[in-house]
């Protein structure tokens, strides 16, 4: 009975939110390359990996109204704190989020004369990484740079040409490495390859590089055939016997799909989202497979990692324990951009009173919903 109640609640609320999103999706596909400054004196809009023109105006509206304190907490305060931090180019850690906050704070700062310090700091941090970083053979390690790339996408148009050339060269070097060594990742068929695709989509769009985008779109089709199994299971789920990895893999699909939508329009994003592999399985099927375990874990129990193909999993703290949906809410925060129904999943998991300002990623991925 509990499962039926959950399902009914989802059916009612998903329809409402999906309908609200539809008109936004139609508007989003025609986003112009640039726009005039919006409410709150935001910087002129350029396409980026984080928000659309509509999204930027929503941030500006929140900043100019009663939600100003929420924006300060999510963006302004972390950006201000980052101004005095020295880049640590050994380990990314939280620096990706801090860099993204610097870039966003520059973009939304009312009064352009006060914004330059955020742009200058973001530029300096990017140059510090560009000077020393080389890609590694571990894409899960390299995933930490995704937010750094996102930050760059926001401010690239405002960086001087000489500095831009340096940072662009670093990104190009990274992309070339992952294209030249593609076989080492495609053969894994798991999240390592999905992360590689995410990185290449990001760099391809930032640099407007046709060769990179052609490679990654072809590789995406190959990965769908290798990674998606019958019933919506993924290679990560089957090999690791865990929703922790089913979710982790989807985290990078979600970011890649958002990139496509933001740069090419919602129609292109939806086309990639709904693309099926050679056994007629698509990304939405992987969410459908996962759904019962998310919204009703009491009646849908999965014991994690019991039959894993990776022995070190047996030393994990969640080994041989029931899957806990709250442990993968960070993935739902990303999927919210392309899957309206996960907003309702989160209300069940976290509580109906959760707000759109709960985390920075949730806020950014729900900007275009009427929440």
Image: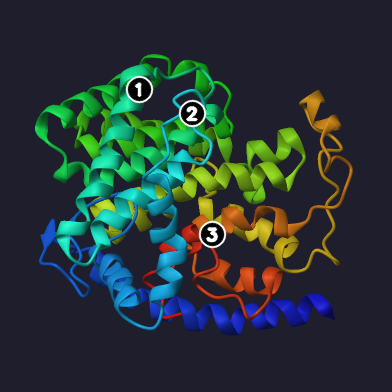
Marks 3 and 1, the one that precedes in the sequence? 1
Q: Residues within 10 Å of mark 3 (few under 14, many from 20)?
A: many
**Residue beneath disc 1:** 174
What is the spatial separation of the Cα atoms under label 2 and label 1, in whole angstroms? 10 Å
From the viewer's perspective, tell me whether residue 96 is left or right of residue 112: right
Point 66% across, 56% down: residue:
289
The reply to whether the C-beta atoms of the residues labelled 2 and 1 are less than 8 Å apart is: yes
Taking 190 as reference, is 240 left or right?
right
Q: Outermost residue, right direction? A: 320
The location of residue 206, given as percent across then percent down, is 25, 39
Q: CA distance from mark 3 to mark 2?
A: 20 Å
Q: Residue at x 39, y 83 (%)?
A: 66
Q: Is residue 22 left or right of residue 36?
A: right
Q: Is residue 128 above or below residue 137?
A: below
Mark 2: few/some/many CA within 10 Å (<14, 14-19, 20+): some
Task: Give the image location of residue 32, x and y in percent.
Answer: 14, 61
Identify the residue position indicated by label 2 in the image: 142
Cβ atoms under marks 3 and 2 closer than 8 Å: no
Q: Quadrant of the N terminus?
A: bottom right
Image colouring: rainbow
Name the one closer to the observer, 345 or 112.
112
Residue bearing the label numbered 3:
333
Check residue 196 in the rendering and tell me which mark sits there, or answer none.
none
- Mark 1, residues whose alpha carbon is within 10 Å: few (<14), some, or many (≥20)? some
- The residue that appears at 54% across and 77% down in the rendered structure is 14
At x 85%, y 31%, the residue is 314
Q: Which is more N-terminal, label 2 or label 3?
A: 2
Residue 11 shows up from this direction: yes
Q: Position of residue 190 (x, y in %)?
A: 59, 32
Question: If you read the primary sequence from the N terminus, does the residue marked by circle 2 or circle 1 appear first?
Answer: 2
Dot 2 falls on a residue whose secondary structure is helix
């Amino acid at each position: 009975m509990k499962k039926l109640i959950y399902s009914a609640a989802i059916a009612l609320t998903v329809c409402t939110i999906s309908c609200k999103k539809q008109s936004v999706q139609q508007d989003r596909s025609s986003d112009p390359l640039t726009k005039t400054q919006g409410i709150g004196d935001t910087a002129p809009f350029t396409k980026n990996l984080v928000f659309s023109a509509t999204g930027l105006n929503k941030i500006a509206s929140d900043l100019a109204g009663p939600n100003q304190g929420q924006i300060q907490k999510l963006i302004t305060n972390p950006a201000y704190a980052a101004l005095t931090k020295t880049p640590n180019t050994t380990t990314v850690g939280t620096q990706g989020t801090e860099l993204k906050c610097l870039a966003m704070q520059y973009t939304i700062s009312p009064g352009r004369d006060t914004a330059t310090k955020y742009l200058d700091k973001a530029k300096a941090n990017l140059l510090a990484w560009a000077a020393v970083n080389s890609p590694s053979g571990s894409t899960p390690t390299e995933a930490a740079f995704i937010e750094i790339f996102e930050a760059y996408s926001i401010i690239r148009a405002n960086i001087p040409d000489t500095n831009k050339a340096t940072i662009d060269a670093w990104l190009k070097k990274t992309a070339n490495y992952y294209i030249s060594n593609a076989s080492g990742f495609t053969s894994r068929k798991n999240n390592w390859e999905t992360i590689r695709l995410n990185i290449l989509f990001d760099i391809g769009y930032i640099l407007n590089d046709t060769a990179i985008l052609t490679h990654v779109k072809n590789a995406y089709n190959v990965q769908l055939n290798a990674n998606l199994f019958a019933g919506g299971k993924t290679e990560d789920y089957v090999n690791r016997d865990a929703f922790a990895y089913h979710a982790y893999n989807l985290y990078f699909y979600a970011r890649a799909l958002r990139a496509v939508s933001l740069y090419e329009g919602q129609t292109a994003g939806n086309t990639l989202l709904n693309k099926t592999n050679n056994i007629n399985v698509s990304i939405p099927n992987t969410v459908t497979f996962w759904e019962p375990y998310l919204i009703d874990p009491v009646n849908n129990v999965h014991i994690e990692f019991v039959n894993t193909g990776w022995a070190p999993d047996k030393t994990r703290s969640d080994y041989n324990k029931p899957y806990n949906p709250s442990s993968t809410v960070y993935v739902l925060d990303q999927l919210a951009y392309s899957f309206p129904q996960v907003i309702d999943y989160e209300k069940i998991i976290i509580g109906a009173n959760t707000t759109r300002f709960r985390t920075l990623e949730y806020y950014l991925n729900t900007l275009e919903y009427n929440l």
